[in-house]
Image (cartoon, helix red, strand yellow):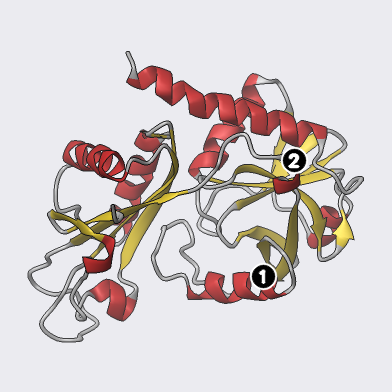
């Protein structure tokens, strides 16, 4: 059976899923999105993802074409239709189609909602899948990075350069300091301290990052919320990045410079294990 997508009120086969060529998401990148992990058919930390979606929508003056409880029902139905046991769930909301290609908001907005799923192994990865290589690259994005915009051209170009260099992720930098990954949040560990940039308009408030910060607090680990330089990252004992699709991903090299002993660090692996347990907790919640 073909994969099923949700497009503006209908569940359709992926190959038949279409939107208008005048959709403002296509024409202007005028929309926002979310990606959540799925394990055992359950969305991981979905309430937090929907809360961030709500904030992104508010920041660009856009409304969801339904209420959030109805959206959650549709999410569960799409996972069921696609028989997703493990993978990712993608959704985006745009300002919809308008009569003409004018930059100003259309007088009568008809928001468009698109959702689909992907099968992907995200839990219990083999050790050789936990050895990410990172390339640094200048951050060329707009200044409102706290909004999860679908306009991702700067990240696409940066991640492609990293891919061509044999790397798994790009860490963007500005004024000598690392901002965040192309699709992740960046952490380093020095002298048993975990370091990551403070949430503000220069980075996206990662949902996985938020959960990891709570785990760090629960474990009484030392955390410094501040920017770090590329040079600091080179000298770190451990490094990792977080996102909904990779959880906590150990970094073994940055710009071909080996981090630590070139293997996933013990503290990073501990955090990954703690996060996987956190992810499993949503299965138990769904069974109550």
Residue 147 location, quadrant = bottom left
Q: Residues within 10 Å of mark 2 (few under 14, many from 20)?
A: few
Which residue is at the front of the view, 163 or 124? 124
Q: Can residue 272 be seen here?
A: yes
Give the residue drawn at x 66%, y 76%. Answer: 161
Question: Where 14 sits versus 281, above or below?
Answer: below
Question: Where 74 sits versus 14, above or below?
Answer: above
Q: Residue furthest bottom?
A: 101
Mark 1 or mark 2, whichever is nearer to me: 2
Left or right for 198, reference 288: right
Q: Position of residue 43 (x, y in %)?
A: 38, 36
Residue underneath mark 1: 163
- Identify the element where label 1 is drawn: helix
Q: CA distance from mark 1 to mark 2?
A: 21 Å
Q: Can residue 250 be seen here?
A: no
Give the residue drawn at x 57%, y 41%. Answer: 209
Question: Where 261 sits versus 163, above or below?
Answer: above
Residue underneath mark 2: 127
Q: Residue furthest left?
A: 108
Q: Position of residue 46 (x, y in %)?
A: 37, 37
């Amino acid at each position: 059976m073909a994969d099923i997508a949700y497009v503006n009120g209908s569940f359709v086969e992926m190959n038949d899923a279409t939107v208008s060529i005048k959709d403002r998401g296509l024409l202007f990148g005028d929309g926002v999105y979310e990606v959540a992990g799925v394990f055992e058919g359950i969305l991981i930390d979905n309430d937090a993802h929907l809360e961030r979606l709500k904030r992104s929508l508010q920041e660009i003056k856009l409304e969801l074409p339904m209420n959030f409880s109805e959206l959650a029902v549709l999410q569960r139905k799409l996972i069921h239709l696609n028989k997703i046991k493990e993978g990712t769930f993608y959704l985006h909301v745009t300002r919809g189609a308008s009569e003409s290609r004018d930059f100003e908001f259309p007088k009568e907005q008809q928001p468009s909602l698109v959702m689909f799923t992907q099968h992907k192994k995200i839990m219990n990865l083999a050790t050789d899948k936990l050895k990410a290589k990172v390339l640094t690259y200048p951050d060329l994005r707009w200044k409102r990075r706290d909004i999860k915009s679908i306009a991702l051209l700067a990240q696409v170009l940066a991640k492609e350069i990293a891919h061509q260099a044999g790397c798994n992720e790009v860490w963007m930098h500005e004024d000598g300091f690392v901002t965040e990954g192309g699709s992740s949040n960046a952490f380093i560990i020095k002298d048993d301290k975990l370091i990551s940039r403070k949430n503000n308009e220069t980075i996206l408030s990662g949902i996985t990052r938020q959960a990891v910060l709570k785990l760090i607090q629960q474990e009484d680990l030392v955390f410094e919320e501040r920017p770090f330089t590329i040079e600091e990252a080179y000298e770190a004992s451990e490094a990792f990045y977080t996102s909904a699709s990779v959880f906590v991903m150990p970094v073994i090299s940055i710009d071909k410079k080996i981090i630590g002993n070139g293997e996933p660090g013990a503290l990073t692996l501990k955090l990954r294990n703690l996060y996987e347990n956190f992810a499993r907790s949503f299965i138990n919640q769904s069974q109550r």
